[in-house]
Image: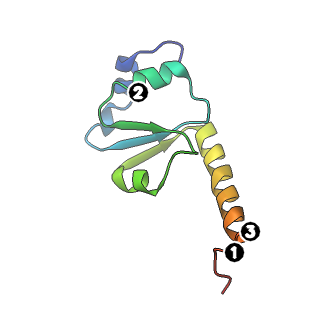
Amino acid sequence: MDFAKTKFLSTVLEPYFTERLALVTGFDPCPNFTKAASNIPNLTVKNPQTFNLLELIRSDLIFFTRDGLAQFEMVLESRMANAFRNRQVPTS
């Protein structure tokens, strides 16, 4: 976003305001977007590293940015690799 305007962001998300929303951005989100999103009451903005199962359960709708989705997949793959390396996942 070129400027931090909550009004612009709220018009984009207006059809979904009856729901609890979660938006997953990249690791380094635009500061203007973060500032605009902080003023919207039912919107939670997370990065892939801090997004967890509790946020998934609490949210009715989850939106991903392109960078956020790619980085979220990387985080999930690394967590799965760590689980296998630490032998916490059953093999059978």
Q: Name which residue lies at 61% across and 35% down.
A: 27
Quadrant of res 53: bottom left
Q: Name which residue lies at 53% across and 45% down.
A: 50
Q: Is residue 9 above or below residue 53?
A: above
Q: Which mark is residue 25?
A: none
Kind of residue sitting beneath label 1: Arg
Q: Name which residue lies at 59% across and 40% down.
A: 68
Query: Residue 80, percent across and down?
Result: 66, 64
Dot 2 falls on a residue whose secondary structure is: helix
Q: CA distance from mark 2 to mark 3?
A: 38 Å
Q: Nearer the viewer, residue 8 or 87?
A: 87
Q: Is residue 84 left or right of residue 35?
A: right
Which residue position is annotated with label 2? 37
* Nearer the camera: disc 1 or disc 2: 1
Q: Is residue 35 above or below residue 75?
A: above
Kind of residue sitting beneath label 3: Arg
Dot 3 falls on a residue whose secondary structure is: helix
Q: CA distance from mark 1 to mark 2?
A: 40 Å
Which residue position is annotated with label 1? 87
Q: CA distance from mark 3 to mark 1?
A: 5 Å
Which residue position is annotated with label 3? 85
> Of the residues under marks 1 and 2, which one precedes in the sequence?
2
Query: Residue 42, percent across and down?
Result: 30, 37
